[in-house]
Image: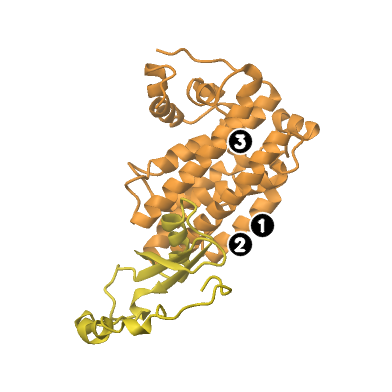
Chain colours: A orange, B yellow
Amino acid sequence: MQASISLQRDARQQYLLRIGDTCLILAQRLGEWTGHAPVLEEDIALANMALDLLGQARAVLTLAGAPQGLDEDQIAFLREERDYFNPTLVELPNGEGRPGDFALTVLRNAFVSTQLKLLWQRLLDSSDEELAAIAAKAVKEARYHQQHAADWVLRLGDGTQESNRRMQAALDKLWPYVAELFAQDEVDEAAAESGLGPRWAELRQEWLSEIGPLLQAATLAQPADRPFLSTGRRGVHSEHMGYILAEMQHLQRAFPGGAW
Amino acid sequence: MSTEAKNEWPLWEVFVRSRAGLDHKHCGSLHAADAQMAIQMARDVYTRRQEGSSVWVVRSDHITASDPGDKGMFFDPMEDKVYRHPTFYKLPDSVDHM
């Protein structure tokens, strides 16, 4: 079996991996819908978005691994769980069983795509030219993902009694994990100082000003904030992360360097 | 529409324009709850390989089509009217691209 790689764990690399892993892990979750979405058109839409995110992940992971001489595949598939830095929100299952809950999936897409859109917009001005170039391409994709997800949140929230009930249940479930998207720490601080990218905390007001009205229009009740803070961005994940990684990594681990 | 079967989204015809200046071409159909959803789905289903720069959707039941049974009456009479093609005229050399 292929051994794990170890990271140098400097602030720049960790900042980049937070972005890349957010895209990577959400792509994996969205990929689980392939062949199972409620309608064919939506099946294709979710797969398209998963592939957009995977493309973004590839670019950012390549950038993150370059100083250590690691390529995108090594970075994506050969890290230990603690070396993944996505917020816990994106690793949560799509819902009970497989493929899961469509309401939860599109609501999470709305949360994450809004966050990524705001982040990519700010990264257009990154001091790292390569990251700025990735952002220029990714921001268009994120805008569409946001529109697509927001459209569904509105339809289902402000839909039938049953669709509203399920969307509200998804909101109650996901909301506690939102706080982490804006948690402040030394990694973000270093990125802000070097001009690499914004503190994610700086995106909070704008995020709320886009998500708040959406929830309201969708007749959903925004849950109260609680002190709970998930810790995926620091590498400490939920119990679900190991299963995703097992599924993602088993091929590269069993057939090192395998390509097709 | 009260006559529609429940749980069945209406059918939409999708027209995609590949480049500015060209016509929108019919490329298929899909089911969607309303026009906005149809546009979004058309984008995801029919333009994912760079096929499009513009998309139209039209509800299929808003299209009135000729009756296949009328084919003989409608179209066959044109078979022997070759003189309707402008191929019997000699164009002067100075006229290009006709």
What amino acid type should be assigned to the residue bearing mark 1? Ser
| Mark in the foreground, 3 or 1 | 3
Q: Distance between the residues labelled 1 and 2?
A: 7 Å
Residue named by callout 2: A213
* Identity of the residue drawn at 40% across and 25% down: A246
Quarter assignment of residue A183: top right
Spatial CA distance of label 3 from label 1 is 22 Å
**Quadrant occupied by the N terminus of chain B:** bottom left
Q: Nearer the viewer, residue A254 or A257?
A: A257
Vertical position of residue A33 compared to residue A252: above or below: below
Whether residues under marks 3 and 1 lie with C-beta atoms below 8 angstroms apart, the answer is: no
Q: Is residue A252 above or below residue B43?
A: above
Query: Is label 3 in a helix, a strand or a loop?
Result: helix
A172 or B39: which is nearer to us?
B39
The residue that disc 1 covers is A209
For image coordinates 48% across by 47% down, the residue present is A49
Q: Classify residue A98 by image quadrant.
A: top left
Taking the image as drawn, is residue B28 in sight?
A: yes
Q: Position of residue A24 (x, y in %)?
A: 51, 35
Q: Relative to residue A205, is residue B81 drawn left or right? A: left
Left or right, A197 with reference to A94:
right
**Are the residues tagged 1 and 2 within 8 Å (C-beta)?**
yes
Q: Mark 1 lies on which chain?
A: A
- Label 3: few (<14), some (14–19) or many (≥20) C-alpha neighbours in 10 Å: many
Mark 3 vs 1, N-terminal side: 3
Mark nearer the N terminus (2 vs 3): 3
Q: Do labels 2 and 3 share a chain?
A: yes
What residue sits right under mark 3 in the picture? A19
